[in-house]
Amino acid sequence: MPLKSEPTSQSLEKKLLILGYEVPDVLAIFLLLSILNFLFGQTNQKLLLVWLPIAVIAIVLRVGKRGKPDNYLVHLAKFHLRPKYFSAFQTPSIDVAPPRRKKS
């Protein structure tokens, strides 16, 4: 009985790109597009208020992310949303001054 084989893709670690953008970038672009279209879609300046900012954002993302690691926007958002101060202890509910040493 011969061994049955199927050809498979050899690039399993290739990242998913849509028109040269990563998936989080595409989601950010389309989220902004939908918000701007909801706000300014019925105006006469739809081209100026909806499509022009999206084109500018897409170009800025393409140029600004050149040379950056994968999922750069996700890591940047996590960095800015994370609390700036970490403590191993809970903040005290009652502030008590430390005891003072008696002068002799």
Image: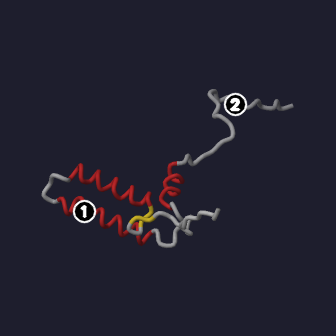
Q: Amino acid at mark 1?
A: Trp
Q: Residues within 10 Å of mark 2 (few under 14, many from 20)?
A: few
Q: Position of residue 6 (x, y in %)?
A: 55, 64
Quadrant where the C terminus is found in the figure: top right
Image check: 37 left or right of 104? left
Query: In terms of sequence position, does the residue under pointer 1 or pointer 2 come before the other?
Result: 1
Residue drawn at (40%, 66%) of the image: 61
Which residue position is annotated with label 2?
A: 97
Three-letter amino acid code at disc 2?
Answer: Ala
Q: How is the image coloured?
A: secondary structure
Farthest residue, direction left: 44
- Count numbered badges in the picture: 2
Q: Secondary structure at mark 1?
A: helix
Residue identified by numbered label 1: 51
Quarter of the view holding residue 103: top right
- x and y percentages locating residue 68 in the rendered image: 52, 68
Which residue lies at the image location 81% right of the left edge and 32% below the top edge?
101
